[in-house]
Image: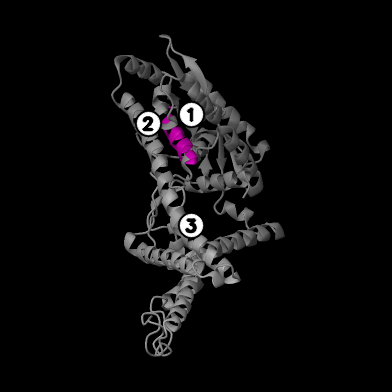
Amino acid sequence: MPVQDKQKQTILKAIGDLGRRVTPADVATKTGLPVLVVQQELNKVAFETGGNMQVGDKGDIVYSFHPGFTNSYLAKGVAAAFVVLGAKLAEVGFYLLRISFGIALIASLITIVVLLLLIAVIVSRGLGSGDDDDRGGGFPIFMPTGGFHFSFWDWMILRDLFLWDAMTRRPVQYYDYRRPTIRQRSRSNFLLNCFSFLFGDGDPNEGIDQKRWQVIAQVIKKNGNVVTAEQLAPYTGADPKDENAVLPVLVRFNGQPEVTPKGNIIYVFEAMQSTAADQDVHPPAYLQEFPWKFTNIPEGELLPVFIVAGLNVAGAWTVWNWFHNQPSLAHSRLMTLVIALVVYGTLFVTIPIVRTLLNSLRNKRIEIRNQKRYQHAELVAKPSDKLLNKLAEAQEFRGSRKITEKDVVYTTEKDALDQPDELSEKFTQKEFDASP
């Protein structure tokens, strides 16, 4: 999905969550998107969904949307249908990719077992054994009385292969910054567990950039739309003394620096002052990243993968060693298959080992960043006298405007010709109230 479409979807959800009467500052606080981007998108959404603009007595713009306004975006024609179809195909394709590693592991182990049985037959015949035809060459585990049977590959493997609801299952426990809730997975799936064993369950900090901007917007709102570099450092991770690190925040939320009478630099975000929706913001003390895990699947559910992967790589090298020592087979086409089995089996256990080492390095860097942000938060929680004076000066610049229905002097819900008298009355009343 293009970036603009994602932004629009984010803004649409924020409008609904905030009660369908919002200002650009409300949506920017909720989503963490730049104020100017929010302003442009709100104009588009209002135009496309029949929303209304209301003008406050101080010139602030409020956008009002009717219930079910998002229905205007449903069924946009063939193009939208193809987008949905493409997304579903991509989802199915990714599911098939994920289970392919488990299927390949099963196929590899079955092939190895067949080759080991073949080797056992050849060896037993070479030793002159005459009673090996009915005993399976000394492999009763895999060929019990009553026919060929693998007790491990029960009907649950086929269930995992064809149970399509497994596509939407996530790891047992994960944190999604876009949806801050902990979710549980209902049951294990061997085929999907193989993919998790190989590649893990994705970045635990996916969406952290969006979360960072959301929290920064909340910090700005909580502090009366006036902040200092020290107050932003626990979220940007920058040195509290580095005023240049605030520039991206100024650009995103349309802020500007101000110099106090005592020479301190503070940052004022006038574009964030007007609000129409009630938001009770509680930003965390600092932005915390989560460490990478080997997998989110419980050890007990992952044990079958460990066992099968171990048997697979051990069996592959056993078959390769026997074929390598047989001149008649070492250069046969069958040897190519054996080499492929060895490579696949070895990679299946090597990739997780390498990934574990990489996760260790990543987690060390994450720990360092978390520690820095925590220390920056401690500076704000226990400010020095100098910082305390700076924060006190910043409070003098605070400002916030709540725009209620009584403050509206113009709205697109009514014809412009019907409103001049109302405008005059309101402005006259305000001038009267302001007079000594």
- Going by the numbered disc 2, the residue's amino acid type is Arg
Q: Is residue 214 magenta?
A: yes
Disc 1 residue crowd, few under 14, some 14–19, many 20+, Cα 10 Å:
many
Point out the frontmost of discs 3 and 1: 3
Q: Is residue 67 magenta?
A: no
First in sequence: mark 3 vs mark 1: 1
- Going by the numbered disc 1, the residue's amino acid type is Gln
C-alpha distance separating marks 1 and 2 = 27 Å
Q: Which residues are magenta?
A: 209-224
Residue 12 shows in the view: yes
**Secondary structure mostly seen in the magenta stretch:** helix
Q: Nearer the viewer, residue 405 or 111?
A: 111
Instruction: Identify the mark at residue 347; answer none if there is no mark.
Output: 3
First in sequence: mark 2 vs mark 3: 3
Return the residue at label 1. 273
Question: Can you give x and y, in whole percent of width and height, for residue 413 in the image?
Answer: 61, 43
User: Circles 3 and 1: CB distance less than 8 Å?
Assistant: no
Q: Secondary structure at mark 1?
A: loop
Q: Secondary structure at mark 2?
A: helix
Q: Nearer the viewer, residue 138 or 128?
A: 128
First in sequence: mark 1 vs mark 2: 1
Q: How many marks?
A: 3
Vertical order, 230 against 264 (above or below): below
Question: Can you give x and y, in whole percent of width and height, for residue 275 in the image?
Answer: 48, 34
Question: Can you give x and y, in whole percent of width and height, for residue 326 in the image?
Answer: 51, 70
Return the residue at label 2. 373
Residue 189 shows in the view: no
Question: Can you give x and y, in whole percent of width and height, for residue 264 in the image?
Answer: 42, 13
Residue 383's image quarter? top left
